[in-house]
Amino acid sequence: MSDVFVVVTAAGSGTRLGFDRPKALVELSGQPLVVRAVNGAFTHPEVVGIVVTAPEDSLTEFTVLFDADQRVRVVPGGAVRQESVYRGLEAIPDLANDLNIALTDTTPVLIHDAARCLAPTTVFHDVVAALDAGYPAVIPALPVTDTQKTVASRQVNVNGITIEKVIGAVDRTELRAVQTPQGFHWQTIINAHRDATHRWGSETEAATDDGALVEACGIDVHLSRGSQMSLKITTKLDLIIAEHLLTHQ
Ligand code: CTP
Ligand code: MG
């Protein structure tokens, strides 16, 4: 049995969802997304501790949600997701220490978006199993179902509509859409984030995916099987779909 730590990223504002509070506090069937994401991660029996990144100005609201649970620590996130993850990772050694759990170079650390709060236990299980088998970076992903095109960067406006010129096609059998929880050995992911923070000064260059930071270090990243249940709640339509999935599964 491994001891697994998780960073649940929940420090985003949820601009595209359009509520008057952070997305992770929005309720899905009566429970905030962040609570669902944390409970979902704890359904994996080896998960021992979770760091939640929260928006700096909503720290109290997030903290009270987990006050009674020593296994959960809430920390302020950053301006972009990459920075939030880094701050979450930096809080893991302290949490491990307080829980009396040894953190080793290969301890599995998962990074999971609160916005993917319906990710099933099987997905967590597969990621952890591959990490335990010695792979340092494992990401759940699904094949892409729509045909893909590449387009010219210049858009054209014609009679009030915007059109784009197709310049090529992509073989979709080679494509995968990646999800979270993304799993890494502790040393692999903390080093990748430290390197990236030193390499990239500005927020515009920040990565939206932790696997990319590990790839940039020249370490192989592998994919495990994702799930349609792990959809990312980004817009109101996603929230409606998630509500439906929850009540009809
Ligand atoms: N996130 C974070 N810190 C940030 C930005 C995002 O921890 N500075 C988290 C979000 O809370 C979310 C995940 O990263 O769980 C994926 O981000 P996204 O779906 O883009 O959420 P938001 O940034 O909140 O939404 P939007 O981009 O519409 O504002
Ligand atoms: Mg965002």
Image (spheres, rainbow, N blue to C red):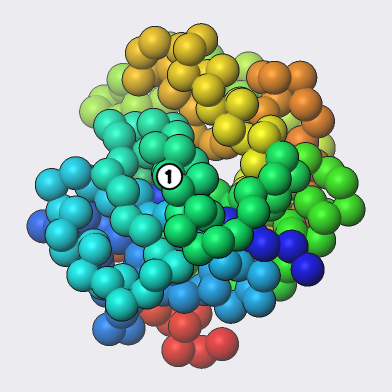
Q: Which residue is mark 1?
A: 91
Left or right: 108, with 239 as reference point: right
In percent of the image, x 88 and y 53: which residue is there? 133
Q: Residues within 10 Å of mark 1 (few under 14, many from 20)?
A: some
Q: Position of residue 177 (x, y in %)?
A: 65, 46
Q: Position of residue 213 (x, y in %)?
A: 60, 26
Query: Residue farthest to the right?
Result: 133
Query: Residue farthest to the bottom?
Result: 248
In percent of the image, x 67 and y 35: which residue is there? 187
Is 30 rendered above or below residue 152? Answer: below
Counting every numbered tag in the picture gives 1
Residue 180 visible to an observer of this rendering = no
Left or right: 129, with 95 as reference point: right
For ligand 1, give the image quadrant.
top left
Is 5 rendered above or below residue 205? Answer: below
* Residue 83 image-quadrant placement: top left
Q: Nearer the viewer, residue 202 or 92?
A: 92
Amino acid type, callout 1: Ala
Q: Nearer the viewer, residue 67 or 97?
A: 97
Q: Position of residue 101 (x, y in %)?
A: 60, 59
Mark 1 vs ligand 1: CB below 8 Å: no
Q: Nearer the viewer, residue 20 or 36?
A: 36
Q: Nearer the viewer, residue 60 or 118?
A: 60
Residue 245 visible to an observer of this rendering = yes
In percent of the image, x 77 and y 40: which residue is there? 136
Is 102 rendered above or below residue 67? Answer: above
Q: Secondary structure at mark 1?
A: loop
In percent of the image, x 81 and y 30: which residue is there? 220
Left or right: 90, with 177 as reference point: left
Q: Quadrant of the N terminus?
A: bottom right
